[in-house]
Image: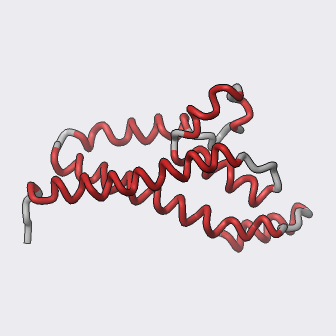
Amino acid sequence: AFVFLLSLMAGMGSCPSLAMLAVLPITLLIAVAALGISLFLAALTVSYRDFRFVLPFMMQIWLYVSPVIYPISMIPDKYQWLMALNPMAGLIVAFRSATLGHPWNWDTLTISAAVAVVALVVGMFYFRKVEQRFADIA
């Protein structure tokens, strides 16, 4: 996908800048957020069987709460800190800044990165806490 992105940027006449080097740490933070949330949701799904029916709705809502299809600038400045509590919001904005040359929103990125790390720690601890109740199926 990254090669496709670079070829698309070349076709559009957009030259990648040095900010593209930030894509790797941003991708690492996205993986941290995804792992933390996945561990937490996996433990909930195993503990509560019906939780698997709630997950698709949660994911759909999370898509609309994250600034994937709209820019974060649509949200008033006084509420952007609240949007940054979504770990993906600041990371999506940072990815856009790195690839498209938009101005960086450091406050949103910092809050989202901190929430991603907290999500990983909480997800790991919760998973380890409820792991003893998982049924062993061999």
48 w.r.t. 98: above or below: above
Q: Residue at x 60, y 34 (%)?
A: 81
The residue positioned 61% from the left and 50% from the top of the image is 110
Name the image quarter holding residue 55: top left
Front residue of this view, candidates 41 and 122: 122
Left-right relation of 9 to 48: right
Residue 38 placement (x, y as % from top left): 36, 55
Quarter of the image for the C terminus: give it.
Answer: bottom left
Residue at x 57%, y 45% (from the top left corner):
111
Report which quarter residue 8 is drawn in: bottom right
2 left or right, relative to 8: left
Relative to 84, does residue 31 appear above or below in the rendering? Answer: below
Q: Quadrant of the N terminus?
A: bottom right
Residue 83 shown left or right of residue 50 in the figure: right
Q: Residue at x 30, y 37 (%)?
A: 54
Q: In this view of the protein, which residue sits in the foreground, 44 or 105? A: 105
Give how far across and how far down residue 13 sits, in percent.
92, 63
Q: Nearer the viewer, residue 10 or 23?
A: 23
* Image coordinates for residue 42, horizontal then vertical, percent: 27, 53
130 up-or-down from 22: above or below: above
Q: Position of residue 87 (x, y in %)?
A: 52, 47
